[in-house]
Amino acid sequence: MRTTISFLRTALCVMLLPALFSCRSRESITEENYLKADSTIWLTYERETEALAECMKKYPEKRDSLKIVAEQVLEIALRKNEALAIKYATTPSGLQRVYMVRLNLSKDTLRAVLETLPKEMQNSPYGKSILAHIKNEQIEEGSPYYDFTATDTNGREFHLSSLSGKNMLLLYGGVDCMGQEGRDFLSSLYHKTSRSNFEIVIYWPCSSLERLKNLKEHFSDDYIYVSDFLQDHSLFKIIYGAQATPTCFVINKEGTVITKSTGLPVEQLKALLENKFFD
């Protein structure tokens, strides 16, 4: 297996050389050049994953080795994505991407990036949001929850603290991303528990009350849907350290975040249900 992985790594390095050379070339820092370089990263990634998928079909006995290589290919693409965003941070799309990958970068790195920006970009929405990320501590497991203010689907002001004393599952979007199996599990969890002890709250990063209402109607569920309609620039997103959808938080009755995960944490939720956590 080691020989196979070593061979595939070598092959991938050869495949990546043109893209790596392109990223390192002394192109001028413009929006157009950023978009071209960004496109190259992801087109290269798509070609490599397609090639790996074909290899898996052709050599099923090497599936485990190829999965390891696929993970490495993704890791390379993600690291190049971050490096490219930093390089082109003085362009609008580059700065936006820095914000999108902020959770993978140290705050010292982000601070250094901000310091290189012209004042107008430092004061742009994404510049201000990166600074807010730097200044605020992000919610992690063991943290007390952040009592955000939002609007529910009835147009009423919502505070997370209004559910104080209950266990909660808080989701940052993602009902559309979790698939039917995930939605069915969420519905089952909801109907196996009592609203006197447990609530499901979905913060959706949308732009309007109308959109929020449409989302709840589309999924036809009774969870609490809320938003502050600030999307990327919401303090909810910044303080909860959420980027991927769904990012999920299980909060106990004492207001402590006991689980934080990217994706619906089905196994943890099953265990909590079996242990009568939601009672």
Image: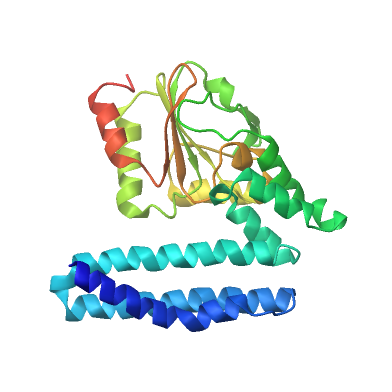
The residue at 52%/80% (across/down) is: 19
Residue 94 versus residue 58 in the image, above or below: above
Position of the N terminus by quadrant:
bottom left
Q: Quadrant of residue 91?
A: bottom right
Q: Going 35% across and 33% down the picture, which residue do you hit?
A: 190
Where does residue 202 sit, x and y in percent of width and height?
A: 50, 39
Occupied quadrant, residue 266: top left
Q: Residue at x 66, y 73 (%)?
A: 34
Residue 82 position in % (x across, y down): 57, 61
Say if residue 108 shows up in the picture: yes
| Residue reaching furthest to the right | 119
- In the rendered image, the quadrant that contains the C terminus is top left
Of residues 129 and 18, the one drawn nearer to the viewer in this rendering: 18
Foreground pick, 208 / 218: 208
Please tell me in which quadrant of the rendered image residue 2 appears.
Answer: bottom left
**Residue 126 in sight from this viewpoint:** no
* Side of 257 where 63 appears, left or right: left
Q: Residue at x 59, y 63 (%)?
A: 83
Q: Position of residue 46 (x, y in %)?
A: 42, 76
Which residue is most to the left? Answer: 61
Color style of the picture: rainbow
- The picture places residue 162, in percent across and down from the top left corner, at 57, 21
Q: Vertical placement of 180 versus 22: above or below?
A: above
Q: Is residue 257 above or below residue 175?
A: above
